[in-house]
Image (cartoon, rainbow, N blue to C red):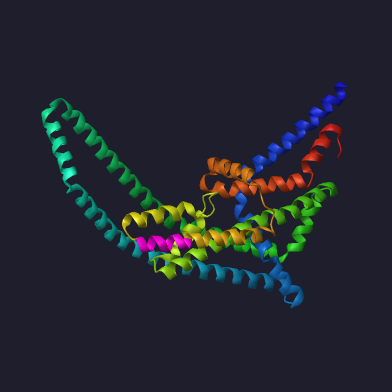
Amino acid sequence: MDRVIWKRVWRALLVLALLAAFVLAVIFVTPLVYPFLLGWLLAYAINPIVNLLHHKLKIPRWISVSFSLLLFVAAMLTIVSALVTRIVVEIITLSKSLTSNIDWWRDQFELIVAKPEIQDLIVKLTSFYQDNPNYQETINSRISDTADLVTTTSTNIITYFLNGIVSIITSLPNVATISVVVLLAAFFIGKDWNLHLRRLTNWFPTQIRQSVSAVWLDLKKALFGYLRAQFIMISITAVVVTVGLLIIGVHYAVTIGMLIGLVDLLPYLGVGAAMIPWILYTFIYGNVTLGIELSILYGVILVARQTLEPKVLASSVGLDPLPTLIAMFVGLKLFGVLGLIIGPVSLVILSAIQKANVFKDLYWFIVRGTK
């Protein structure tokens, strides 16, 4: 009996050691080879087009890969250039409009201060300040501390913004180099896709290949289906918001539409996290017409999402709301904003592994030494 227990402990330790080695390899090796992983993903993405050109049109595979990569690069450059140009123009327009908003708030502040009630309050505060010299030093200290805090916060915000711009500019050569490596890796991987696939599968025993194949098939349906569904829903939100803002006549509609589309990633809050404060601001600002129009647009977005989301998610593997919320929160704590995507993706991967009975196989390996 002791021998059986020791064998189980040994197999459990072996599984844990292999799992730890895999995690460490992912942590330390991924930063070194991530351009080639991106190249593999790109080669996998364009592989259907390459196979179509190669098998149907009888075009040599290396030419098919080259054409597909050129098509991808041209599409990306066109989209990015158009978006950057539009965003820059609208940011300039937005910065100009801030001046008028600041003037409006200054006028409103002056009107409030000019009211008799406020003037009486100011007189009372001034009298209290003059009649109580013991409090003058404390009050002056608090005012000085508040001014220092505002100054420091403003300086930090400006410094952070400028440092971000400098970091983006200085990272452009590195991004260009990595992009070239990714494209070259995608070319060589895509050119000999079947050869590399055979070599990779020959490294593993048949039993492991079967488990990995089952995980991969389920993962393709779940993970890529989930990502595709999220991308479609974000795109729908961004397009509806942009078109609605253009109809209303709001400036920098494209920029706002893209930002609200990204905000749509937030669990449960979604578009409301951006639209509701904006609607309230317009009513406070006094622009009732714009507030009503934005409210109607928000209603249209909600109806469109409720109508289209079930159909979009029907082709993908949906996740329960509670586990998804937990995964997003844990991802946010561990990886920051990017964790909002990493969390659900990790949950999908674990679900695919569970459906492929990998955990069950590991359990029987520990208990019996076999499945």
Q: Quadrant of the N terminus?
A: top right
Left or right, residue 72 beside residue 85: right
Tell me if residue 293 is in the magenta stretch: yes
Q: What predominant SS class does the magenta segment belong to? A: helix
> In this view of the protein, can residue 181 be seen by the observer?
no
**Relative height, residue 203 to residue 48 (above, below):** above
Q: Nearer the viewer, residue 94 or 198?
A: 94
Q: Position of residue 231 (x, y in %)?
A: 59, 59
Q: Position of residue 88 (x, y in %)?
A: 40, 65
Choose top left, top right, bottom left or bottom right for residue 310: bottom right
Choose top left, top right, bottom left or bottom right for residue 123: top left
Give the residue displayed 62% in from the left and 48% down from the top.
344
Left or right, residue 46 beside residue 275: right
Q: Quadrant of the C terminus?
A: top right
Q: Position of residue 115 (x, y in %)?
A: 18, 48
Q: Residue furthest right?
A: 1
Give the residue displayed 55% in from the left and 67% down from the top.
76
* Number of on-image labels: 0
Q: State which region is magenta.
A: 288-297
Q: Position of residue 212 (x, y in %)?
A: 77, 50
Q: Nearer the viewer, residue 184 or 217?
A: 217
Give the residue displayed 73% in from the left and 63% down from the top.
193
Left or right, residue 334 beside residue 281: right
